[in-house]
Image (spheres, rainbow, N blue to C red):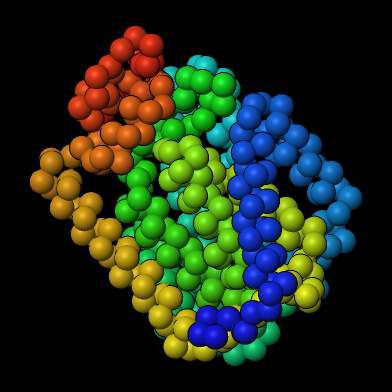
Amino acid sequence: MFLFEPLTLVQIVMWFVVLGALIGLNELSRRGPWAGAAFFIALPIILTIFVWPTTAGADSSTGTWFHWVKVYSALAGCLGFMAIRYIPRLQKNKWALMFPAGILALNIAEAVIRDFQVGGMGADGVVDGVYMLSGPWNYMNGIAGLINLLAITGWMGIYISRDKTKDMIWPDMIWPWIIAYDLWNFAYVYNCVGDHAFYAGAALLISCTIPAFFIRKGAWLQHRAHTLALWMMFTMAVPAFTSTSDFSVDASGDPAALFTVSALALAANIALAVLQVTLVIKRRRNVLKHEIYDHSAAYRRVVAEIPGASTAQLEAAGVAASSADTAPAQGATA
């Protein structure tokens, strides 16, 4: 195969098991504060004390600085989002609403640094428990990640859904940015942790994209934080799953494959940048104050279907506002 070694039926079935488990656990974890606390406070404390010191040591493929930073930054995102979701005064604080964009930017920056680091290693062999091949693809994808980071917009329009789940809704984060992110992040995992990419790249990314498009629209970042934290906790506790078990899938290590995925990621993010710059100029939007996709059908669907958007957001999207569906002080206006 081009990207990976030839797959067995067991590996294919397990890919769908992982995908389904991540989607299902994400649904459970967002059902309320107690569910979130169990998954993202109690469980990590137990794992930190009793499991990870043994399973994620220096000789493990998940024992690198990046894995440790990634798991705790993902958990920090989950906890920060829970605070915004369940503490009413934070939902009205514009500085608190900058946290989601900040933690997202930090996570992207971590991966960009790692891509550049791997590119400068001159690696052609096993590094930190996985095979790495350094090349121009690392720098191409690092640039794609920087573009994706700079393309984050619309955090001032984040609001909390006025229903039982109290999801963190980011209506300006629609499919052009999400697809560009997915392509970039898959290329990052393929470049830097290639032997984990079958699950940590494809399954993990799809597990948050499906809910964002079909289950709870507008909550992609919340889905991403939950599924990423769940996956990182699992792989640090069971590193053999992606390295030596019957379910593990090695990347092909083909330079053509590495170049292709990074080229696609770079092209997609350049296209995203062109689109957003065009919208900013054409619509005269200030990305520090305004949402830029509030004219789009995807944006309209989110604010129309999920109660809690401000009256200004509904009006900007051309959606009729009603007292039952709006929350005057939720987030900033468009």
**From what the image shows, is residue 14 above or below residue 92?**
below
Q: Tell me if 328 is positioned left or right of 254 in this view.
A: left
Front residue of 205 and 19: 19
Task: Report the number of discs.
Answer: 0
Front residue of 302 and 90: 302
Front residue of 292 and 252: 252
Q: Please state, as top left, top right, bottom left or bottom right, where the N terminus lies in the image.
A: bottom right
Q: Residue at x 57, y 21 (%)?
A: 164
**From what the image shows, is residue 146 above or below residue 286?**
below
Q: Please state, as top left, top right, bottom left or bottom right, where the C terminus lies in the image.
A: top left
**From what the image shows, is residue 56 above or below residue 332?**
below
Q: Tell me if 136 is positioned left or right of 238 in this view.
A: left
Q: Residue at x 89, y 50 (%)?
A: 50
- Asked which quadrant contains residue 4, the reply is bottom right
- Asked which quadrant contains residue 213, the reply is top left
Residue 147 on image: x %, y %: 34, 60
**From what the image shows, is residue 293 above or below residue 320?**
below
Q: Residue at x 55, y 69 (%)?
A: 189
Q: Residue at x 59, y 90 (%)?
A: 124
